[in-house]
Amino acid sequence: MAIRPIITAPDPRLREVSKPVQAVDDALRALMDDMLETMYDAPGIGLAAIQIGVPKRVIVMDLAREDEDPEPRYFVNPEILAPSCEKSIYEEGCLSVPEFYDEVERPAQCRVKYLDYNGEKQMLDADGMLATCIQHEMDHLEGILFIDHLSRLKRERVLRKLKKERRLAAAE
């Protein structure tokens, strides 16, 4: 397993639409292991493959708290089948948009069809933070960042700040 660099906005690779995975094999499991290690190191609760520069429809997440045993989850080719009409609002952050958090409204529940770590078909009914996290990470697979759900003014302010930080880091 290896910790990989996380791409941050406004890197154009984050806007790429990820491609479906053809087979869950040892190479893909190694990718998922690297993703999980990278996510834990960041630290974060979810990571899409595109965030480490791999445009595949793969997500990992773990919503366990620090005082709980890890509960890693793996989603390959996830599809949301039934988002609820009911909405919920959570404060979201993103490893690709560091140090910025804001409230985002999303469907409160969703049903997700996916392949697991072993390539087995799965179905999950999610609500609460799990539903929010799945939808946030699945947005990445479509080239969407959580700041795209905010007002244009807020989004532009965040991107300007990130560009400035990138320029300052490059000058050092």
Image: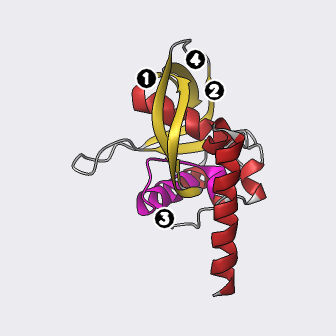
Q: Which amino acid, by three-letter code, is at mark 2? A: Glu
Q: Mark 1: which secondary structure? A: strand
- Residue at 59% x, 56% y: name it: 96
Q: Distance between the residues labelled 1 and 2?
A: 15 Å
User: Residue 110 vs residue 162: left or right?
Assistant: left
Of all residues, the one furthest to the left in this rendering is 67
Q: Mark 4: which secondary structure? A: loop
User: Residue 18 vs residue 112: left or right?
Assistant: right
Circle nearer the viewer, 4 or 2: 4
Q: Distance between the residues labelled 3 and 2?
A: 27 Å
Name the spot of residue 142 as percent of width and height, x first.
72, 39
Q: To which residue does mark 1 refer?
A: 127
Q: How is the image coloured?
A: secondary structure
Q: Which amino acid, by three-letter code, is at mark 4? A: Pro
| Pick the front one: 23 or 79 | 79
Name the spot of residue 117 as percent of width and height, x first.
51, 41
Q: Which amino acid, by three-letter code, is at mark 1? A: Asp
Q: To which residue does mark 3 refer?
A: 1
In the rendered image, residue 122 lying in the magenta stretch gets the answer no
In the rendered image, residue 41 lying in the magenta stretch gets the answer yes
| Pick the front one: 115 or 105 | 105
Q: To which residue does mark 2 refer?
A: 79
Circle nearer the viewer, 1 or 3: 1
**Pointer 4 or 1: first along the chain:** 4
Q: How far apart are marks 4 and 2 (CA)?
A: 11 Å
- Residue at 77% x, 43% y: name it: 17
Q: Is the magenta stretch mostly helix, strand or loop?
A: helix
Q: Mark 3 near mark 4, Cβ–Cβ under 8 Å?
A: no
**Pointer 1 or 2: first along the chain:** 2
Name the spot of residue 144 as percent of width and height, x first.
70, 41
Q: To which residue does mark 4 refer?
A: 83
